[in-house]
Amino acid sequence: MTNDVSTPGDQAAEQNRREEQLIQRVLASFEATPNPRLRQLVQALTKHLHAFMREVRLTEHEWNGAIRFLSDAGHITDDKRQEFVLLSDVFGASMQMISMNNPLHGNATEATVLGPFFVNDAPEIRMGEDMSFGAAGEPCWITGSVFDVAGNPVPGARIEVWEADEDGFYDVQYRDDRTAARAHLIVPEDGEFRFWGLTPTPYPIPHDGPVGKLLELVERSPLRASHLHFLVEAPGYRTLITHIFVKGDELLTSDAVFGVQDSLIKEFTQHAAGSPTPDGRVLPDGATWSDVRFDIVLAPGESGGQRLTMS
Ligand code: BEZ
Ligand code: FE
């Protein structure tokens, strides 16, 4: 090989040849990978990584910055905080994964991100009970049903629900070990459920780390549209991880993690203080309340699939 190239055009062609040759050598280095799927993954990653670097003509300064960013993400990650999933969330990669792995199935309810605040072993509530457990916020009467795509109820389905309080915090973000605004309930024979929760309010994703800094640099808001999380599991059905969003919320079009699906936007009806509640619950003087209905349709499939993801 020689560096003896005479014109700028020749030099550019030689540069291009060398860049492409390097990619071919890296691809060849993976060729003997025994697992065909792993081989496909590492070779495709090589192609896309090099294509990205060449497309933007990445500088060494930028590459070092990216490595520093990933190192910072690693340093802030522990068993409670997962900055890499947050990174995947704000790039829409989490939603892309969810949509590719939960393909539309008839009228089955659509999935969205799990988020970092799901906790196993939330307390059980019975039908009509309150999952807020004293968390601050406007009471919300939530009713709905769990059916299969053929319209049959799914008794025994386990519904997990969790949400932030009106100050924008989940219980696990307080330092006092409280359990509030989360619960699970078991769907009865007729498939219908009802419980008290809180009217969802907006809150930011954790933005005190490298991902927050990135959002700041690109002038994007860390706020999520107001939502209430659901995880629904039943044997023989695809585990559904989803939220409901509040119709009219101005953040619906700018959700920080691209989690909003039109089919998940629900009408939360507001009720004036003093108006009677569906179950005769007496609310404190001056307390307004809301109600919403969420009819859930489960796709057939394997339960448990997505549950391992912590973000
Ligand atoms: C959440 O909904 O709680 C959430 C989702 C993704 C990233 C951060 C928070
Ligand atoms: Fe959330």
Image (cartoon, rainbow, N blue to C red):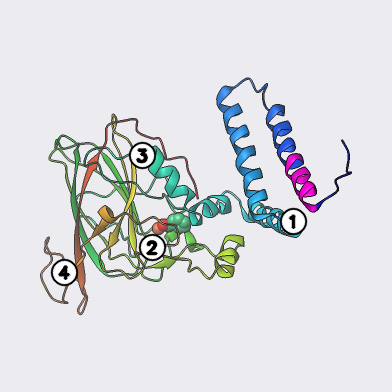
Q: CA distance from mark 1 to mark 2?
A: 37 Å
Tell me which label, 3 or 1, sits earlier in the chain. Answer: 1
SS state under label 1 = helix
Residue furthest front as drawn: 7
In this view, the residue in front, 154 or 5, is 5
Residue that badge 4 annotates: 282
Q: CA distance from mark 3 to mark 1?
A: 36 Å
SS state under label 4 = loop
Residue that badge 3 annotates: 102
Residue that badge 2 annotates: 164
Tell me which label, 4 or 1, sits earlier in the chain. Answer: 1
Q: At x 25% / y 39%, what residue is drawn?
A: 298
- Few, some or many C-alpha atoms within 10 Å of disc 3 (few <14, some 14-19, many ≥20)? some
SS state under label 3 = loop
Tell me which label, 1 or 2, sits earlier in the chain. Answer: 1
Q: CA distance from mark 3 to mark 4?
A: 41 Å
Residue that badge 1 annotates: 64
